[in-house]
Image (tube, rainbow, N blue to C red):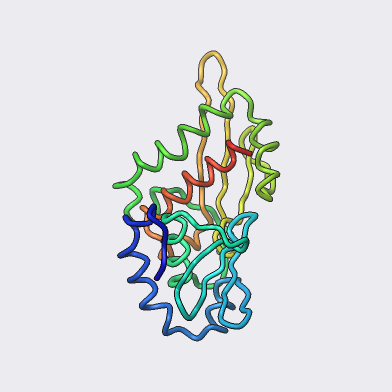
Amino acid sequence: MQGGAGDKRYVDAIAKAWEDLKGRDPAQLAAISGGELSGRNLTVRILQREAVLNLDSGDIRWSDGSEMKGDFKVVLMHYLQNTRGRLEGRLVSYREIEGGNLYYSVFQGRAIMPLIKTFGEAPEKLLEKSSKLDGRPVKRGDASVDFLFFPYLLVNATIWKGDDEVPSSANVLFDAAVIGVLPAEDVAHLSGDLVQLIIRG
């Protein structure tokens, strides 16, 4: 398993996941993950980009050949290990994910607070920025967008604009398919990464 210097914290987690994945049937892995198999390369969409896992070496890179951050790699590997190849069609909160209560302060700091700070007074900007990540506006709050982080992992970000009496608020919800697929720590990472990508536009 290869990785850049920034991946040191994640090497063990990636290696452990790879030990499981390298024994899987490639065609089945592609089908259940929503990915595409080309030779020994499995390509999986992450938001508006594509990740490529080489099924011989375990190397993971973006489709343009650039290095992927360690937390993205870990989340992708865990998704590939555990996805059931479907969305459930209902949303759950972070606290409903196993370990969600334990990691909630991390999730709040990485995802919720930056959303409020950036878009709380201007919900329309959430819609504008999200279009660059293939976000799909939905009717919820003052601005709400669904994102397919992975083919079978939907994330929703919503803003409620405050007034003189009630402060602005935000939430990040997930299709229920996430339960049992990703641990709370992974979900906190992907939520924070998603919010930062939205903010950067």
Question: Could you tell whether 50 is left or right of 83 in the image?
Answer: right
The percent coordinates of residue 175 (x first, y second) are 53, 57
Question: Could you tell whether 102 is left or right of 141 in the image?
Answer: left
Instruction: In this rendered view, identify the residue nearer to me: 164 or 146.
Output: 146
In which quadrant is the N terminus drawn? bottom left
The residue located at (58%, 62%) in the rendering is 65
Question: Could you tell whether 19 is left or right of 61 in the image?
Answer: left
The residue located at (63%, 25%) in the rendering is 122
Instruction: In this rendered view, identify the residue nearer to me: 124 or 197.
Output: 197
In which quadrant is the C terminus drawn? top right
Instruction: In this rendered view, identify the residue nearer to me: 26 or 97.
Output: 26
Residue 148 lies in quadrant: bottom right
The percent coordinates of residue 125 (x first, y second) are 66, 31
Residue at the extreme top of the image, as rendered: 164
The percent coordinates of residue 171 (x first, y second) are 50, 39
Q: How many marks?
A: 0
The residue located at (35%, 43%) in the rendering is 104
Residue 126 lies in quadrant: top right
The percent coordinates of residue 199 (x first, y second) are 58, 36
The residue located at (51%, 58%) in the rendering is 67
